[in-house]
Image (cartoon, rainbow, N blue to C red):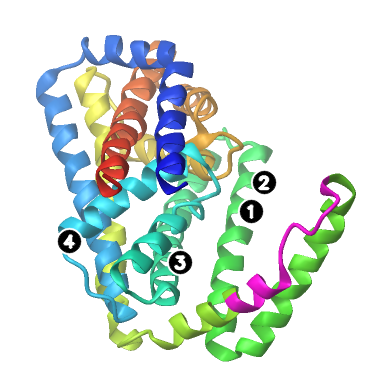
Amino acid sequence: MKKLIIALVVLLGILFIISRFTEVQEVLQVLQKGNWLWLGAALLLLLGWILVTAATFQSLFSMVGINKPLLQVLRLFMAVNFINLVAPSAGMSGMVVFYSDAQKNGHSTARMMVGSALFLIFDYCGLLTIIFFGLIILAFYQVLWAFEIFAFILFLLFVSAIISVVYLASRSEERLTRLLLKMARFLNRQTACILKKTLISEERVIRFAAEISEGVKAIQNLRNGWVRPAGLTLLNKVLLVSILGMMFLAFGTPVTPGQLIAGFSIAYLFVIISPTPAGIGIVEGLLTFALSSLSVPIEAAAVITLAFRGYTFWLPFLFGMISFRSLHS
């Protein structure tokens, strides 16, 4: 059964590539027209981003008492990224990979889950900060739209919910259990008519709450331990913005820091708040529109968007597929 599930996940990844084959071809055609010096620099920045993200996971796992080599965490992160793209859920589906690895290597699954939840909190808080400034820049250019504000509010509420669950787990396991049970019962009532069965088992909810509370209590050196992951998270975002900047240089298009930050903000806001995996098919259009509204020529905006997505979506996707397969070989 395990081998069947692994094969199915890899098959989904291949089918996903086939379904987007036209877009992959467009990305390859666009990259061939860019300056290879700047594209090479962007590739180095992408590899740096991958390493920094893995180091962030490593530092957060260390906070909850799990020490893993960077290379092992790197492989896990790439596999998690692949799962999040194949089965999008705002970063939550990838936790299954961490959970499985914890069971396989004798680590506490509770601590592993809390470590990955802390990563989401750090990463999303970093994104929220940049997106907030990006929206201010869009307002300055008088091209801020209501749907962008609405998406930002949804993202803020989602991050607040994750923080609230972790905070509640640190204060009272009993209160966390009651809250999660209320949510589970509400969802079960809403889906009862369609599924004709209970969607979420209350026993699993109680066990999940206990595991989260156990993991949160295991956090070590919280007072000073947040400095390193916070710094790595900041570096993570700087590298991503720099990759977008390299795309402007690669295609000979001038850009200001304000345009760069605003464009990046729109791209990553809808990477998260999107019904498609990592905003595929949506981010491309919105980023092109955002850049053109910021006085970037529409042709250049479309080319830069495709190149940027090729680096930040398709390359990590392929790396993740290979990593996922190697982890279960």
Neighbour class for label 2 at 10 Å: few (<14), some, many (≥20)? Answer: few
Does the image show residue 237? no
Could you tell me if residue 296 is visible in this image? yes
Q: What residue type is disc 4 on?
A: Leu
Q: Give the range drawn in magenta.
A: 195-207
Residue sitting farthest toward the front: 1
Q: Do the residues labelled 2 and 1 touch (CB within 8 Å)?
A: yes
* Position of 185 relative to 276 (above/below): below
The disc, 1 or 3, on the residue closer to the chain's N-terminal end is 3
Q: Which amino acid does label 1 sit on?
A: Ile
Q: Residue 117 carries which label?
A: 3
Q: How far apart are marks 2 and 3 (CA)?
A: 24 Å
In primary-sequence order, the first of circles 4 and 3 is 4
Q: Where is residue 56 in the image (x, y as percent from the top left)?
A: 27, 63
290 sits to left or right of 296? right
Cα separation between marks 2 and 4: 38 Å
Whole-angstrom CA distance, mark 4 to mark 3, is 19 Å
Q: Which one is earlier in the sequence, the residue at label 2 or at label 4? A: 4
Taking the view exactly as shown, the residue that stands out farthest to the right is: 193
Label 3 residue SS: helix
Residue at position x 59%, y 49% in the image: 152
- Within 10 Å of the Cα at label 4, are there few (<14), some (14-19), or many (20+) other Cα atoms? some
Q: In this view, does 302 lie to the left or right of 89?
A: left
Compute the Cα span from label 4 to label 1: 35 Å
* Residue 304, percent from left and from top: 34, 22
Circle 1 residue:
153
Tag nearer the camera, 2 or 4: 4
Identify residue for label 4.
Answer: 70
The local secondary structure at tag 1 comes to helix
**In the rendered image, the vertical position of residue 229 relative to residue 93, given as above or below:** below
